[in-house]
């Protein structure tokens, strides 16, 4: 459809032309929800990526570090294999539940033992949970053809095929995560000066980390439940936002959210155009951008050290 057809389909009288009526139906039930989800999920993944890099002090961290992607995937294949669910609308809430539980488990593991509260401990706990859940997901998928087919679609990461009946509840969880993120931004700036400095300036480190990880889990879990895992997006936009704003998270996080929405929306549009009449899922396009972005980060690091 051309932009002119879309415009006329939206604003012309419904009875004026059957073709315009069909276009209006397509736009209102397919294109608009898809655009809204791309924006909402992009904001969530962008903000989540910036937050996880701040809390782990790891410049190559993204939301998958908390195990939300693997938790969602594991839950999807499990409920399909056990309950025989076939409609994505049926298992999307199981995906969110799995993502949330994985995030809680990772944070719980990182909060016990000698290394409790250490960013490195969080990263190691996340990696351990991710590897375990990925292995379990593969085992279930290989033993059940229906689960394997669903996993293939799920892992691609797409904003297509989701209606407002799912988008609005997902948006509510993302909004809650954004509120928590805004609350914790001043403390996050101080935490990046070091735990001792932050504690000396009056920051409740345990409370701040708990709020921050909860925000990341809500943001990444809801976005992953609706779209599937979309790799590299949070990592990429967090680096671009840091380049534009500097290290102040009060500016960096909002910019990361804005850039996340723009990048995911553009990737979805590009995916629809480059292989017409078929299309590439947005997650595939983002991943194709992510590989050269990683290479650019490596090159820039070597260039600076030279």
Image (spheres, grey):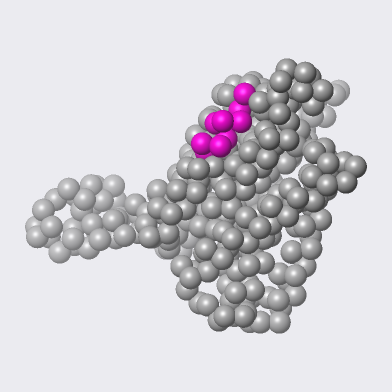
Question: In the displayed image of the protein, which residue is found farthest to the right?
Answer: 114
In percent of the image, x 73 and y 48: which residue is there? 107
**Is residue 182 found inside the magenta-colored segment of the image?**
yes
Residue 148 location, x and y as percent? 64, 75
Compare residues 175 and 146 and report the one nearer the observer: 175
Give the left or right position of residue 257, taking residue 31 as reference. Answer: right
| Magenta stretch: helix, strand or loop mostly | helix
Residue located 77% across and 18% down the image: 200
The quadrant in which the N terminus is found is bottom left
Q: Is residue 304 visible?
A: no
**142 or 306: which is nearer to us?**
142
Considering the image in quadrants, where does the C terminus appear?
A: top right
Q: Position of residue 288 (x, y in %)?
A: 62, 50
Tell me the residue at 11%/53% (across/down).
13
The answer to whether residue 201 is visible is yes
User: What residue is rendered at 62% in x and 44% in y?
Assistant: 214
Viewer-closest of 194 and 74: 194
Residue 235 on image: x %, y %:
66, 40
Q: Which residues are magenta?
A: 178-186
Residue 198: quarter of image: top right
Name the side, left or right, on which 174 lies relative to 147. Answer: left
Q: Would you identify the image quadrant in which residue 95 lies? A: bottom right
Q: Relative to 271, is 132 above or below?
A: below
Measured as percent of width and height from the top left, residue 255 is found at 54, 29
Q: Decide whether residue 303 is among the magenta residues.
A: no
How many numbered marks does the figure carry? 0
Q: Which sits in the foreground, 78 or 273?
A: 78
């Amino acid at each position: 459809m051309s932009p002119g057809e879309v415009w006329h389909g939206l604003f012309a009288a419904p009875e004026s032309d059957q073709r315009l009526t069909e276009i209006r139906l397509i736009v209102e039930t397919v294109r608009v929800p898809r655009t809204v989800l791309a924006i909402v999920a992009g904001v969530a993944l962008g903000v989540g990526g910036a937050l996880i890099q701040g809390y782990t002090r790891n410049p190559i961290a993204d939301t998958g570090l908390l195990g939300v992607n693997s938790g969602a995937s594991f839950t999807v294949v499990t409920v399909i294999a056990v309950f025989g669910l076939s409609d994505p609308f049926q298992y999307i809430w199981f995906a969110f539940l799995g993502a949330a539980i994985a995030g809680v488990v990772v944070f719980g593991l990182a909060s016990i033992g000698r290394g409790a509260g250490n960013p490195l401990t969080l990263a190691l706990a996340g990696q351990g949970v991710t590897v375990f859940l990925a292995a379990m997901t593969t085992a279930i998928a290989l033993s059940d053809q229906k689960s394997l087919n669903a996993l293939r679609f799920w892992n691609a990461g797409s904003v297509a095929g989701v209606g407002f009946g799912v988008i609005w509840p997902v948006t509510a969880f993302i909004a809650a995560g954004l509120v928590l993120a805004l609350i914790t931004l001043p403390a996050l700036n101080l935490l990046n000066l070091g735990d001792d400095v932050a504690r000396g300036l009056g920051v409740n480190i345990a409370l701040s980390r708990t709020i921050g990880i909860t925000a990341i889990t809500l943001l990444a879990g809801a976005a992953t439940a609706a779209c599937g895992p979309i790799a590299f997006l949070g990592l990429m936009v967090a680096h671009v936002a840091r380049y534009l704003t500097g290290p102040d998270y009060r500016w960096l996080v909002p910019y990361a959210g804005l850039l996340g929405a723009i990048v995911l929306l553009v990737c979805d549009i590009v995916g629809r155009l480059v292989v017409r009449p078929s299309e590439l899922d947005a997650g595939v396009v983002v991943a194709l951008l992510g590989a050269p972005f990683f290479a650019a980060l490596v090159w820039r690091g070597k260039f600076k050290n030279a």
